[in-house]
Every structure is written in structure tokens, then in C-alpha cells.
């Protein structure tokens, strides 16, 4: 295998800044704190907040670019506007969302970005004080947060059913060694999605892998996943 040193960088995943000098022949690769891979931003701290912020900013830029020509243009039908919403806005906002850890702040920001587009399509503003669920029902649009949760638990099913030796499955099952550093523990994606299944589907963590292992049963449960109530 040949490595292009001009296109290669090194990054260490650690809570603290760690120096790691990787040498290719006589050249040392530059060490970075973040890099993009397949359009997703990875950071040395292992958190996804920066990437989620990037996705929301990119979706907002799409809406600004389409605002006059599409979103509020009266000559376009709602069907055409929603087609653009589904084919451009949603993929831009949710790219790589399967591995997001969704905090309440993140859910609120994603929903705000979603409703900023849909509210304009419906010809409404915040001053009209119409609930988000009512706007989605009028437009016939599924909640974006529901779509994200369903997709995340769908990816959980793929990981659990992966045969031994597949790298994504091995990473999913791996447990960190050593003592946990002091401070509030971080939420790992596996713990987050297990809690999500417990909260949203009532499946205890000790029964999760057994249920997820049945592909058709798991798929039917995800199809019946109810939307979350809108915050008051």
C-alpha cells in the first residue's frame, strides 16, 4: 500500500491532547484536532456536536438560498416545495445522523431547523402560534426527529446482527479498558440507543439484543414507533 504524505494527516482520539508522531519514510505526518471523512467532521475528542452544528448550518444555508425562488414563491405548489424539502433540505440536515447522540438541546435545534422550512411552506410564522404537529399534519410530513430515531435504531439492528469479524460490529461491542477518568461520564452511542429503545419501545436493555436479532420483529416495531409530543 502506498501512502500519499501530502494527503494524509494524523489524529489521536483522546480526552486530552496527546502528541503522536507518525512517520512515513522520512516525513512526519501533520497531527490535527479534526478532519473530514466522507463529508463528516471527526474531532479528536470524539464528540459529534461540531458535526451536528455543521449540518444545521448547511441546512440553513440551503433554505436561505431557496427562500425566494422556492420556499415562499406563490407560483409553486406545496407539493413541489415539499418535494424539494425531502430531496435537498432533509438529506443536507441529517447526513450521517445514524451515529448522533441526540441531547434535548440537539433535538430542539434540529426541530427548529425543520420547522423553519415547513412553517414558511405553510405560509405561517411564529407569531401565528400554530403547533409544529399541526403544521406537519396539514402538510402531510413525518416528524424529522421520528425519522432520525427510527433510522438510528435501524442501524442498531444492523450492528447487532453483524457476524463476528465485521469491524463496525466489533467496535459497537467493544468496551473501553482501564479506569474512567474523573468527571461526568460521556454517553456512548451504544448506551444512548439502548436507552432510546427502552424509552420509546419499552424494551429492557437486557432483552434488547434478543428482540433486535429478529429482523422482521424489529422492523415492525420501528414502523409503529410513535412521534414524540411537541414541547410546550
Image (cartoon, grey):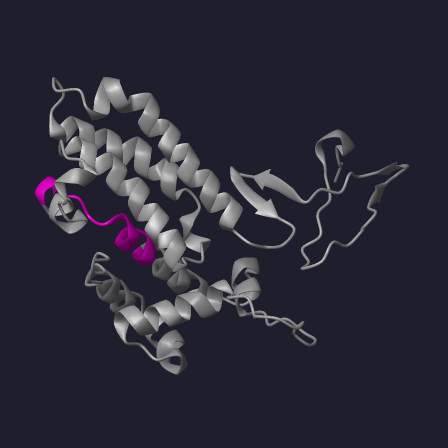
User: In the picture shown, does residue 151 fall above or below 87?
Assistant: below
Q: Position of residue 56 (x, y in %)?
A: 40, 40
Drawn side of residue 74 relative to residue 231, left or right: left
Q: Position of residue 147 (x, y in %)?
A: 28, 52
User: In the picture shown, does residue 80 fall above or below 214?
Assistant: above
| Residue 46 on the magenta segment | no
Q: Nearer the viewer, residue 222 or 92?
A: 92
**Residue 165 visible in the current orientation:** no
Drawn side of residue 20 relative to residue 190, left or right: right
| Residue 143 on the magenta segment | yes
Q: Nearer the viewer, residue 45 or 190?
A: 45
Q: Position of residue 135 (x, y in %)?
A: 13, 44
Question: Residue at 26% across / 37% down in the picture?
Answer: 116
Quadrant including the N terminus: top right
Q: Quadrant of residue 29?
A: top right
Q: Position of residue 198 (x, y in %)?
A: 33, 74
Question: Residue at 23% across / 60% down in the picture?
Answer: 228
User: In the picture shown, does residue 188 fall above or below 30?
Assistant: below
Q: Nearer the viewer, residue 71 or 150?
A: 71
Determine the residue located farthest toward the bottom in the rendered image: 206
Determine the residue located farthest toward the front in the rendered image: 127
Q: Quadrant of residue 4?
A: top right
**Residue 92 visible in the current orientation:** yes
Quadrant including the C terminus: bottom left
Range of the magenta residues? 138-150
Drawn side of residue 216 relative to residue 161, left or right: left
Main secondary-structure element of the magenta-colored stretch: helix
User: In the picture shown, does residue 140 fall above or below 105?
Assistant: above
Amino acid at each position: 500500500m502506498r501512502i500519499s504524505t501530502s494527503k494524509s494527516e494524523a489524529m489521536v482520539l483522546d480526552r486530552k491532547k496527546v502528541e503522536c508522531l507518525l512517520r512515513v519514510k522520512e516525513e512526519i505526518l501533520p497531527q490535527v484536532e479534526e478532519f473530514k471523512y466522507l463529508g463528516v467532521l471527526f474531532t479528536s475528542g470524539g464528540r459529534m456536536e461540531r458535526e451536528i452544528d455543521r449540518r444545521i448550518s448547511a441546512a440553513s444555508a440551503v433554505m436561505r438560498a431557496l427562500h425566494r425562488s422556492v420556499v415562499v414563491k406563490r407560483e409553486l405548489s406545496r407539493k413541489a416545495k415539499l418535494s424539494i424539502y425531502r430531496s435537498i433540505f432533509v438529506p443536507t440536515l441529517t447526513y450521517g445522523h445514524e451515529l448522533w447522540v441526540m441531547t434535548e438541546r440537539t433535538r430542539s435545534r434540529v426541530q427548529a431547523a425543520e420547522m423553519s422550512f415547513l412553517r414558511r411552506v405553510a405560509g405561517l410564522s411564529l407569531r401565528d402560534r400554530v403547533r409544529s404537529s399541526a403544521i406537519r399534519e396539514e402538510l402531510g410530513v413525518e416528524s424529522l426527529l421520528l425519522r432520525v430515531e427510527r433510522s438510528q435504531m435501524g442501524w442498531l439492528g444492523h450492528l447487532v446482527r453483524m457476524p463476528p469479524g465485521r469491524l463496525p460490529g466489533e467496535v459497537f461491542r467493544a468496551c473501553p479498558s482501564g479506569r474512567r477518568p474523573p468527571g461526568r461520564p460521556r454517553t456512548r452511542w451504544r448506551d444512548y440507543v439502548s436507552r432510546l429503545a427502552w424509552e420509546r419501545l419499552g424494551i429492557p436493555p437486557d432483552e434488547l439484543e434478543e428482540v433486535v436479532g429478529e429482523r422482521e420483529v424489529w422492523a415492525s416495531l420501528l414502523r409503529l414507533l410513535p412521534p414524540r409530543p411537541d414541547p410546550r
